[in-house]
Amino acid sequence: MLNISFGNPDLITVFVRLVLALVCGGVVGLFRSIKRRGAGFRTHGLVCVGSCLVSMTGIYLYYAFGQNAGDVTRLPAQVITGVSFLGVGTIIVMGGRHIKGLTTAAGLWVCSGIGVALGVGFYSAAILSVLIIISLYVLLPNIDQAVYSHSRILDLYIEFQNRKAVGSFIRYVKGRGGRLVMMETDNNKGSREELFCVIVELEIKKGRLHEAVVSEIMQMPEVAYVEEI
């Protein structure tokens, strides 16, 4: 019989809780992906699965050790906290707005939870967590990218022939129903010294493909180079 309430969890209950955590965390992450924010489907899914695993491990410890569970959980709790700080070291902020390494940090944190579960003998939850995480990496690697490609938010690195060319670019964006959300100059010069390099965030018209917008911008005579970031 399926038991999804608190209690000594059986294998099916453990599986259902972990999958629900993946789905619920992933759904929240999808909304972040639509807005082109750093933490998307995989990052939210990993953190939610890890939190679910740690919570169930606490329940397991209670049933395994009873009143002595408080003493037993101290060291694993410190391990999980310590790995959280380790994960921070894998996060890199690029261009003042773009973040790399969030999924790696989340993966490290979840692995600490798996290690704790294995250490206390909660093998079923640990193994199921590994299988779910592998499926997240192998079977669902392009969900964030697929959502990004249909998002109305588009981040670009552009090299203009000169500073005055920016005006033509802004008129192009407005003429096609878009909006310039943010523009900042890039301190790293482009392929030539006279180029004016910027990072822009655009809100494009609904239904427009990112590849088409990038291609159109590249055709502008004032643009030397453009790349989606």
Image: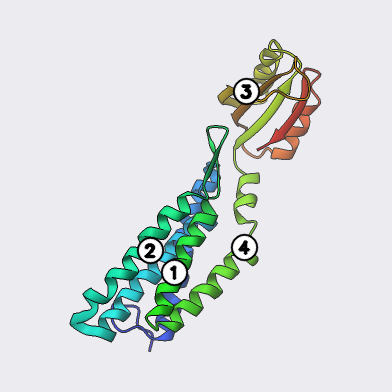
Up the image or down, 146 lies above or below 115; here it is: above
Residue 80: mark in rendering: 2
Q: Where does the image place residue 31, in percent across and percent down from the top left?
A: 49, 49
What residue is disc 1 on? 20
Q: Are marks 2 and 3 in contact (CB under 8 Å)?
A: no
Up the image or down, 115 lies above or below 1; here it is: above
Identify the mark nearer the N-term, 2 or 3: 2
Q: At 64% across and 50% down in the image, what residue appears? A: 145
What residue is disc 4 on? 140
Identify the mark nearer the N-term, 1 or 2: 1
Of tags 3 and 4, the one toward the viewer is: 3
Residue type, numbered disc 2: Ile
Identify the mark nearer the N-term, 4 or 1: 1
Identify the mark nearer the N-term, 3 or 4: 4
Q: Counting other residues with Cα less than 10 Å from the Cα at mark 1, is it few (<14), some (14-19), or many (20 or more)? A: some
Nearer the observer, 189 or 133: 189
The quarter of the image holding the C terminus is: top right
Of tags 1 and 2, the one toward the viewer is: 2
Q: At 51% across and 61% down in the image, what residue appears? A: 107
Of tags 4 and 2, the one toward the viewer is: 2
Residue type, numbered disc 3: Asn
What residue is disc 3 on? 187
Q: Are marks 4 and 2 in contact (CB under 8 Å)?
A: no
